[in-house]
Amino acid sequence: MRYGFGVDIGGTTVKIAWFEESGKKLRAWEIPTVRENNGQQILPDIAAALQNFLAEQGVDRGDVIGIGVGVPGPVDSRGVVQVCVNLGWSEKDVCKELSELTGLPVKAGNDANVAAMGEYWQGSGREYNSMIMATLGTGVGGGIVVEGNLLHGSHGCGGEIGHMVLNRNETERCGCGNRGCVEQYCSATGLVRLANRRLAEDEAASALRQLEKMEAKDVFDAGKQGDAVANEILERYYACLGEFFANLCVVVDPEVIVLGGGVCKAGQVLLDGIRRGFERFCFQGVKGVKFTVAQLGNDAGSYGAFKLVLDAFG
Ligand code: ZN
């Protein structure tokens, strides 16, 4: 039996998991992400945690396939990060550095792409050959897998679907500096922004006006209660998501679109709404795409990270 690590580096913690080749997760734990001094300690900390684990378990290093790593920023196909603001990194060759520290093969990818790979391998994408994952949270993240291959892109920006332009007339800026990005409309934050814009249009009565600080969930809850303004906002939201996915489908033509992130807690009502919005805009040939929600939650990253190293060195 051979084994390997899946490591998902986040801004506050590093999730580490130890897998059997088959994909069975045997152990998982976290260590803090030390971002001081430009995150210089992050890779040495990870290396130490893995080395200690192997020593404690008495694992023969010849049985270790390697270490897969997800990084919260763009990672090119060689595993090099140009800049990662979340970790304080400037240019960093993650594969080379972690490999030198541990003596094990390393493969790295962007965290959203790696999470998509996790869902494709062991989650909602299991039964399909091609998949787009879209994470609707504070922002919009994504990953694209075609015939088992993750799209990293030439600059590590493959699958950065949250920064496709959805409205070239937008006046407010996205976190990336551009205007009119998908993220400004389709994230949880985007839904609240759409809601506040709608409320400012007129005086129509809505339970949403009573809220001190509106969250995405409030709009879905009010919609369920029959609040007409909330339902109007949700239809605008579904139209944005529908246009977004219709555009993606004529590029990738996936079998399934897997949705992750906090907005997915809305469940079937969201899936039905997206289907309505999608059918307004989609090219006829891609109509058969399925929409579903992610299954692995926060574990998707470590599964996908291990799958990267398994594919490269397994
Ligand atoms: Zn943007």
Image (cartoon, rainbow, N blue to C red):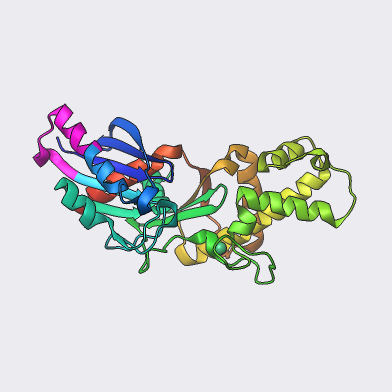
Residue at 14% in and 31% down = 55
Q: Position of residue 83 (x, y in %)?
A: 39, 62
Q: Quadrant of ligand 1?
A: bottom right
Prevailing secondary structure class for the magenta stretch in the rendered image: helix
Image position of 203 (left or right of 193): right
Residues 194 and 276: in front is 194
Residue 115: within the magenta? no
Residues 244 and 161: in front is 161
Q: Position of residue 78 (x, y in %)?
A: 27, 63
Residue at 37% in and 66% down = 153
Q: Position of residue 158 (x, y in %)?
A: 41, 63
Q: Residue furthest front?
A: 37
Image position of 33 (left or right of 271): left
Image position of 293 (left or right of 1): right
Q: Position of residue 103 (x, y in %)?
A: 14, 48
Residue 50: within the magenta? yes
Residue at 30% in and 47% down = 41
Q: Is residue 276 visible?
A: no
Residues 79 and 1: in front is 79
Q: Which residues are magenta?
A: 49-65
Q: Residue 264's image quarter?
A: top right
Q: Is residue 249 visible?
A: yes
Residue at 76% in and 51% down = 196
Q: How many marks?
A: 0
